[in-house]
Image: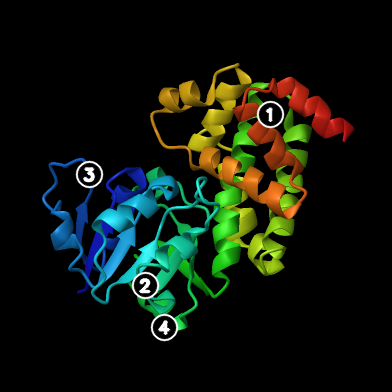
Amino acid sequence: MVRVGVIGAGKWGEALAFAMSEKNEVVITSRTPRDWSNFKTLSEVLECEYLIITVPAQEIGEWLQSNFIFSGQKVLVASKGIEASSGKFLNEIYAAYLPNENLAFLSGPSFASEVISSLPTALVINSVSLSTAEEFAALFPSFIRTYLSRDVIGAEIAGAYKNVIAIAAGICEGLALGHNAAASLISRGLVEMERFGRSYGATSETFLGLSGAGDLFLTASSSMSRNYRVGLGLARGMSKDAACTEIGEVSEGIGTAYALHEIARQKGIYLPIAAEVYAILEGKPPRQSLKDLIER
């Protein structure tokens, strides 16, 4: 039995801690204390050989700088996003604190509520080190099927970008545009994020599999997705802050939309859907965005 430490006790952290407890001894910690028997201090959790970190993308740089002490641990990154303030991908942020060979990144379609109900799930563990990916794969429970990949940047981009498309899909639903429009949006969103990924050297296969199409279809088609629910709020004329307050959860797609906007501006990459999501977050009327997308 391996001791696994989970950092971050939100819904996703709680779900992963539950899943990992089938085969392992699991301890968990977060900024907000929980009255759980396996809740421990951060220093105790950091002593584990295997760590799963669910700290949100927009907070992880500051958290690592203030809290992380490397002592040979292997880390599975279970959050998704691009840091808005710097445009950095998570692998770039983590690489400043531990070797790439000790890092792995979790991707694929996975709602926390279904994982914590032990429903069948398939995920991808991405790492430059196949042995590290295999070690983490061995920790997963019987109801989760894991696949391995070395395309870290592709998985990262897919996991971050799909949240932006999910916001757009929520807006589409909120405006009652119909199933034709939703299918068109999601399929063109997949093309857009694959094009963006190729500009960073990602493989096209990643975007056709669980990390890309699988996660996108899940997140952009269900009100169980927090980013989709943000889109629903924006369609009703709410501000991004009001929409986030209403759902009561972090929407990683918002920070990623701002990061994509800046990257596209600097590199001249054509990202029409992401550009309109950014504009709506900045106050553009959603129906005007729809008109502009159709007429472009």
CA–CA distance in space, label 3 to label 4: 31 Å
Residue at label 3? 31
Q: Is residue 224 visible?
A: no
Check residue 131 in the rendering and tell me which mark sits there, or answer none.
4
Residue type at numbered disc 1: Cys
Residue 61: percent from the left, percent from the top? 38, 54
Look at discs 3 and 4 and give the one toward the viewer: 3
- Viewer-proximal residue among 243 and 142: 243
Check residue 172 in the rendering and tell me which mark sits there, or answer none.
1
Q: In this view, does 289 lie above or below 193?
A: above
Residue 112: percent from the left, percent from the top? 40, 46
Q: Can residue 245 be seen in this view?
A: yes
Residue type at numbered disc 3: Arg
Mark 3 in CB contact with mark 2 (< 8 angstroms):
no
Look at discs 3 and 2 and give the one toward the viewer: 3
CA–CA distance in space, label 2 to label 1: 38 Å
Q: What element carries label 3?
A: loop
Residue type at numbered disc 4: Ser
Check residue 136 in the rendering and tell me which mark sits there, or answer none.
2
